[in-house]
Amino acid sequence: MGVEVKVEGLTKSFGRQVIWSDVSLTLPAGEISVLLGPSGTGKSVFLKNLIGLLKPDRGSITIQGNDLTKLSERKLYEVRKLFGVLFQDGALFGSMNLYDNIAFPLREHTRKSESEVKRIVDDKMEMVGLAGTERKLPGEISGGMRKRAGLARALVLDPEIVLVDEPDSGLDPVRTAYINQLFVDLNQQIGATFLIVTHDVNTARTVPDNIGLLYRRHLAMFGPREMLLSSEEPVVRQFLNAQRQGPIGMSEEKDVGELEAERQAGYEMPPLPPIALQLLPTDGQVRAGQRPPGAWCQANGVTPPPGSFQDPPGVAGSAGNARHAQSSGWTKPAGRADDDTLALPRVEG
Ligand SMILES: Nc1ncnc2c1ncn2[C@@H]1O[C@H](COP(=O)(O)OP(=O)(O)OP(=O)(O)O)[C@@H](O)[C@H]1O
């Protein structure tokens, strides 16, 4: 399950306002990718282009050999069935209970019997932890539950590609952590290709296999998580480390004067923080797209920042690392203390 999405030279404007131009990236089949960018850089517009709700000015979006930008409305309707989308607010119908909201795409797009619909809805509600809330109305539940209901609805047609727009908006950090874990678990269970649009740096640091950053109407960088988290590229470094110092200003980019003032004030970019361990599925299995910690750095001769790939404080006995080791063939080199810096993956044969 999960299909590749290949975007080449995509450009979108509204009238004379260019939102972004020449965006090229490939979402690898079955992997989780995150798209970051300052507010207003066109991340949501990018998602809407991917599902054909907006038409780009130029460029192509290729899925299973079809260029979505060139499809007829009828063919596009068919290809859209590959997608499950979670919009920012869950986009639930306020007058329908959760069961009917989640059943809606099945009743609308398939000829399944009501007993079959019930089986699928029950299954998806269980997957997102909402079993027992079928009769609740969207207005009676929390924002986090609404998102999970929206997610269940996005899953009912068994999508190959799941698009998520700002899952953390309006959620506290704990609920954000829960929903992030849910994405990892779902990716492991259904194997779909995930693209998550977010501003949340912690999500970007711990969830995806790949990260992209939109900035100044371009895709500044897109690639494996470890590549961006060890990047010295000023924009990438500033954004991923949530710093004030760097080229991104209050309203998009800083001008030359602001940068010069910053330089004269002696501001320097702090050292790169450690690369966190990537979240594992809760059942301890490794997702198909998951790479062993440090694999990209090792393959590319990059020394990760000190302290990388350690368990977060409070995880006794390096349980997380042990789980990585167990399931990915990765081992911590002998003779290194638990609080030592980097342990690289074992290179096979
Ligand atoms: N249908 C539309 N017509 C005209 N302009 C639009 C339309 N949709 C979006 N825009 C403009 O495109 C720009 C990018 O909007 P978008 O919502 O994609 O940004 P974003 O990166 O998702 O922002 P945020 O992180 O704040 O949600 C904004 O200037 C917005 O006003």
Image (cartoon, grey):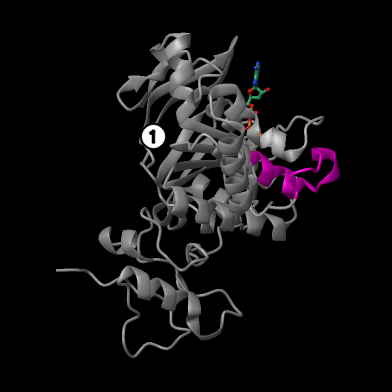
Residue drawn at (84%, 39%), measured in percent from left and top?
Answer: 139
Question: Few, some or many C-alpha atoms within 10 Å of disc 1 (few <14, some 14-19, many ≥20)?
Answer: some
Magenta stretch, main secondary structure class: helix
User: Magenta stretch containing residue 136, yes or no?
Assistant: yes
Q: Position of residue 268 (x, y in %)?
A: 57, 58
Q: Answer above or below: position of 336 versus 46.
A: below
Which residue, given by chain and number where applicable, does mark 1 sit on? Answer: 25
Q: Identify which residue, 308 or 26, lies in the foreground.
A: 26
Q: Residue furthest left?
A: 349
Of the 4 image quadrants, the one containing the N terminus is: top left
Magenta segment: 133-150
Q: Position of residue 140 (x, y in %)?
A: 85, 44
Q: Residue furthest right?
A: 140
Apparent side of residue 190 relative to residue 85 in the rendered image (left or right): left
Residue drawn at (45%, 48%), measured in percent from left and top?
Answer: 190
How many numbered marks appear?
A: 1
Q: Identify which residue, 218 or 2, lies in the foreground.
A: 2
Q: Position of residue 312 (x, y in %)?
A: 56, 74
> Dot 1: what SS?
strand
The amino acid type, in three-letter code, at marker 1 is Leu
Residue drawn at (46%, 10%), measured in percent from left and top?
Answer: 74
Apparent side of residue 344 relative to residue 279 in the rendered image (left or right): left
Of the 4 image quadrants, the one containing the C terminus is: bottom left
Q: Position of residue 112 (x, y in %)?
A: 54, 29
Q: Answer above or below: position of 73 versus 115.
A: above
Q: Answer above or below: position of 346 versus 226.
A: below
Q: Identify which residue, 43 or 62, lies in the foreground.
A: 62
